[in-house]
Image (cartoon, grey):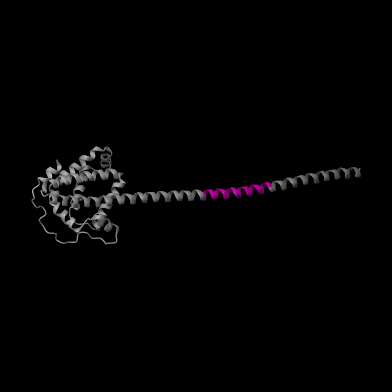
């Protein structure tokens, strides 16, 4: 049924403008982001196509955003995250801007930096990657439905969908990469704290061992002194007995 429907599309051209040749991707060739863009084959022309699609996206963007947040109600934990950290209306405004930037036809350092910042916020509020991926799939389906309503030529429809899936894939790469980096950072910090705790425990154990050794030595000295004093006391007793004995003898001799 789907293919029958597609064959009925009229051959009305949608992309009538010629590529203006403007450089829309601005990154050094040896950077990871440049390599990622190359791997998904996101081209300057794709961004030109996205910019041409922007008017029809703007026309229906309110419906797309409403459907996006309506779908989040399926998972109650997502709504709790929103209620605890922001509001649906505020996030709707943010998503409208986000979608508009996807179809602005430019991918540069500012574009990437903003996506990384959004990902960091998602991580901070406890959004799990699986819910992020699911939400973006819903967004893609809404946009595809929108294109199907406006683009009659099937090849042009395919061109629009391909360009859109590429920019969405880049969005997901940026967010998931940030998630991974942040998780790695948290793990490294936890390992560092664990190592510091281990070091402190070792230092404390060494200090206690040293203190115990010093205490033992002090006790040994006290015991040794005590033995000496006992010996001296015993010698003193013997001398005292001898003096007493001699005193008695002297007294007898005197008598």
Q: Report x, y in % for residue 77.
A: 28, 39
Q: Report x, y in % for residue 200.
A: 48, 50
Point 30% across, 57% down: residue: 32
Q: Quadrant of the C terminus?
A: top right
Q: Quadrant of the N terminus?
A: top left
Q: Decide which of 219, 2 is in the foreground and name it.
A: 2
Quarter of the rendering containing residue 15: bottom left
Point 48% across, 49% down: residue: 198
Point 57% across, 48% down: residue: 209
Q: How many marks?
A: 0
Of helix, strand and loop, which mostly describes the magenta segment? helix
Describe residue 117's horizontal placement relative to residue 239 as left or right. left
Describe residue 211's horizontal placement relative to residue 57 as left or right. right
Q: Decide which of 22, 61 is in the foreground and name it.
A: 22
Describe residue 55's horizontal placement relative to residue 122 as left or right. left
Describe residue 104's horizontal placement relative to residue 203 as left or right. left
Quarter of the rendering containing residue 91: top left
Q: Decide which of 168, 87 is in the foreground and name it.
A: 168
Q: Report x, y in % for residue 163.
A: 19, 52
Q: Decide which of 214, 191 is in the foreground and name it.
A: 191
Q: Report x, y in % for residue 247.
A: 85, 44
* Magenta part of the chain: 203-223
């Amino acid at each position: 049924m789907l293919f029958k429907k597609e064959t009925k599309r009229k051959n009305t051209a949608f992309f009538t403008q010629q590529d203006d040749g403007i450089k829309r991707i601005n990154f050094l060739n040896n950077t990871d982001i440049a390599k990622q863009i190359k791997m998904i084959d996101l081209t300057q022309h794709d961004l030109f196509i996205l910019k041409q699609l922007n008017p029809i996206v703007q026309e229906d963007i309110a419906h797309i955003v409403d459907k996006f947040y309506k779908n989040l109600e399926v998972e109650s934990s997502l709504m709790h995250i929103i209620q605890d950290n922001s509001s649906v209306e505020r996030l709707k405004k943010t998503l409208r801007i986000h979608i508009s930037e996807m179809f602005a036809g430019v991918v540069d350092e500012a574009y990437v930096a903003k996506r990384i910042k959004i990902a960091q916020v998602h991580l901070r509020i406890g959004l799990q990657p699986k819910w992020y991926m699911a939400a973006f799939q819903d967004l893609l389906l809404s946009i595809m439905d929108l294109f199907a309503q406006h683009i009659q030529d099937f090849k042009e429809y395919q061109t629009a969908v391909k360009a859109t899936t590429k920019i969405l894939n880049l969005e997901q790469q940026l967010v998931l990469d940030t998630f991974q980096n942040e998780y790695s950072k948290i793990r490294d910090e936890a390992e560092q704290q664990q190592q510091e705790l281990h070091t402190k425990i070792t230092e404390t154990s060494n200090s206690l061992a040293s203190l115990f050794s010093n205490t033992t030595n002090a006790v040994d000295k006290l015991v040794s002194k005590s033995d000496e004093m006992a010996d001296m006391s015993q010698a003193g007793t013997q001398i005292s007995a001898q003096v007493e004995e001699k005193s008695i003898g002297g007294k007898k001799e005197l008598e």
